[in-house]
Image (cartoon, rainbow, N blue to C red):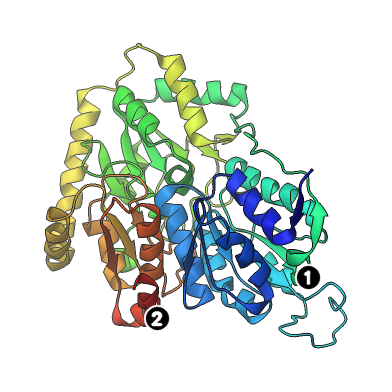
Amino acid sequence: MPKLTGGQTVIESLKTQGVDTVFGIISIHNLDLFDSLFGSQDSLRFIGGRLELGCGFMADGYARATGKPGVLFTSTGPGAADSVGALGEAYFSGSPVLEITTNVEQEFMGQGKLSTHETKNQLGMFEAVTDWNAMINQVESIPDNITEAFDRFQTRRPRPIELEIPTNLLGAEADVEMLTARQPDIPQGDPNKVEQALQMLLKAKRPAILVGEEVQMLGGTQQIIELAEKLGAAVVTSDGAKGAFPEDHPQSLGQILGRRIWGENPVQDWLGTCDLVVVLGCILPQRSTTGIGLKLPKDMVHVLLDGEAIGKNYPATVPIVANSQAVVQQWLSAIGDKDVHKGKSFQDDIASVKGEIRRKLEETWGNELRVYETVRSVTPRNTIFSLDPAVAASRASRCLEIYEPRTYMHPHGWLGLGFAFPAAVGAKVGKPESPVVCITGDGGFQYNFQELATCA
């Protein structure tokens, strides 16, 4: 077994997981970590920001644009605390961010001796905004904890994870057994329920598919397009899944958002005329469903990795705890070459409501629609749009067409201002070949406009 410092063990463990980029801020408490990082810059680059909040949003934007976990390095106390807002957004939006931060030296931990940057309960501070967090008390445990974090990113609803390492361990040496990256089993769902749901799909005459944020992050767009086209199903997306189904597809009816700041949306009532809705990777949050006022048919198949969220806002006829992409692939394999299309009448109805949606947008937001159509006309299909949760972004959710997954990001979970610009930076780092457009107001921009220096 090689003898490594704690800092070296962190870096080597991240490289084993395929990490190529780290965001963060250098501090006296994590210098040993950065000493190890700078020895690996040929394979692991560091993007240094100006504030931990902005760095956290960069890591989130990187994750949303690439589908890979964003990694964030921070330091004890105020540095760690400064990142909580970014992790909160990642938690409620369902974005995989791994924060590795430091804590005071082990000899001072929990003693209240006012060691530099000491926090009363730093680990507890992060519990509310992470799927899992842990204190690492020995160098030898670092590989196992980092491997566990990446396993969770693949098998659970994507959410942030925080790992704390006492600062003295980063420079301490130990004989370390490095682990290889694992390929955990992707949840496939109960076979009986998967089959039951398939039979409901085949019998339905007016099926709709509601695509959610798990699909946006974990994939499945191509399988859903194939399924929708085989069935002739209508497709809508949730607030966090814009672009996970191409909005210029003839069967796309866009976002389910409506009323309040989003304007009247005919699809909200029209979905209630369908005889089945298949919800894929969406938690059906109160915000996306207009205060749980969205009309859905009584027959619902709900596929979600987060089993605890199934049934909270809408009852599911067939609940399936699984990865949506895996379930749709099983349905496609079972359908094969069979003719299961629902026929021209339903397609005509989809086209009719699509036209009605357009007319309502022109009546309500004609000016905004023209602005966003102009923006769209001069940007390639793979352009990534990053927005803040203000009025401009709420209009974009209905007026700006998005054609590819992971090309539209906004803080749809916690709705914190200041996300758009640093997230755009992170997206550009992760997808340098894609144009990136940031849409924000003067207030939202000023939350993190110091990250202009990061771009320089």
Amino acid type for the residue under numbered disc 1: Asn
Instruction: Judge left or right: residue 18 versus residue 374.
Output: right
What residue lies at 41% left-to-right and 75% top-to-bottom? 418
Which numbered mark, 2 or 1, is in the foreground of this view? 1
Q: Which one is in front, 177 or 436?
A: 177
Which amino acid type is shown beneath numbered disc 2? Gln
Q: Which residue is mark 1?
A: 168
The one nearer the camera, 234 or 104, is 104
Left or right: 154 in relation to 113: left
* Residue 387 position within the rendered picture, expressed as x and y whole percent measured from the top left: 33, 66
Quadrant of the image containing the C terminus = bottom left
- Disc 2 element: helix
Asked whether residue 119 is in view, the answer is yes
Residue 118: give x, y in percent of width and height.
75, 82
Lateral position of residue 447 relative to residue 91, left or right:
left
- Label annotation for residue 450: 2
